[in-house]
Image (cartoon, rainbow, N blue to C red):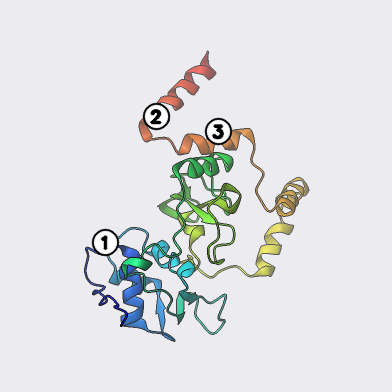
Amino acid sequence: MEHTEEAPDWRDERLGARIRVALWLRDEVGVGGIFTKQQVRSAISGTEQVDRRMRDLRPAGWEIRNYRDKPSLQADELFLEKIGLPVWEKEHRAAGLRQISAKTRRLVYERDGHMCRRCGVAAAEAYPDEPGSHARLTLGHINPHISGSSANPEDLLTECARCNEPVRHLTGVQMDRQQVWDRVKDLPNKERQTLLAWMIHDARVVSATERAWGMYRQLPAVAREEIKRELYDLLRS
């Protein structure tokens, strides 16, 4: 008779966040259950990147839908459609995990100018629409929902943590197509042409100055102060 490990308790803080999230979903939500990301964060409190650990379950066969996949859901709701591999069992703990090497991470950040490819914010830069909140850069997969997608530079892009969220906690109501188009029409013609080029390339083409800014923002505060003083002195000389 095949032996199966007894599932641990999701409240056990010695377990990894991915395992605790999986157990919480199984025991507290169940297949067909609706939950919110805030409920996950509250249950697995004191753990960084809980949302990412939940996404890491998808390549292991867990199917979690959001309002884009299931229109009946509210923007902040998620739906547990299928429980996948029991990642709390030793033989399944690495199932679906995609390891990104330090070298690959550095290559992608440098290629993308240390700026989010979605919204253009640089590392540690304040969000214009969210005072007091500063960007933290991470890596996202171009096709995040494809099970077993690789972790090669061409499959990755730099995203801020906010853009990396599959369900975003937006301030106010999300803009619809007409509102976005109205903003586009209000742009001067030169900026419309620039925007069209970005749309065609599906990427914001950044200038050398913007690249330097992105690289500067990812430095520690002390190093940024040193460069700022040196640039100030250079311009005065």
Q: Can residue 114 be seen in this view?
A: no
In front here: 174 or 106?
Answer: 106
Q: In which quarter of the image is the N terminus?
A: bottom left
Type of amino acid under label 3:
Ala
Q: Which residue is located at x 62 percent, y 33 percent? A: 208
In front here: 184 or 118?
Answer: 118
Which secondary structure, mark 1?
loop
Type of amino acid under label 1:
Gly
Q: Can residue 217 be seen in this view?
A: yes
Q: In this view, does 228 lie above or below 194?
A: above
Q: Where is residue 35 in the image (x, y as percent from the top left)?
A: 40, 79
The quadrant in which residue 205 appears is top right
Q: Which residue is located at x 41 percent, y 53 percent? A: 133
Question: Mark on residue 212?
Answer: 3
Question: Mark on residue 223?
Answer: 2
Decide if residue 34 is on the left or right side of residue 3.
right
**Disc 2 or 1, which lies upstream in sequence?**
1
In front here: 48 or 179?
Answer: 48
Q: How far apart are marks 3 and 1 (CA)?
A: 35 Å
Type of amino acid under label 2:
Ala
Q: Which residue is located at x 32 percent, y 68 percent? A: 19
The answer to whether marks 2 and 1 mark residues whose Cβ atoms lie closer than 8 Å is no
Which secondary structure, mark 2?
helix
Question: Mark on residue 46?
Answer: 1
Which mark lies nearer to you, 2 or 1? 1
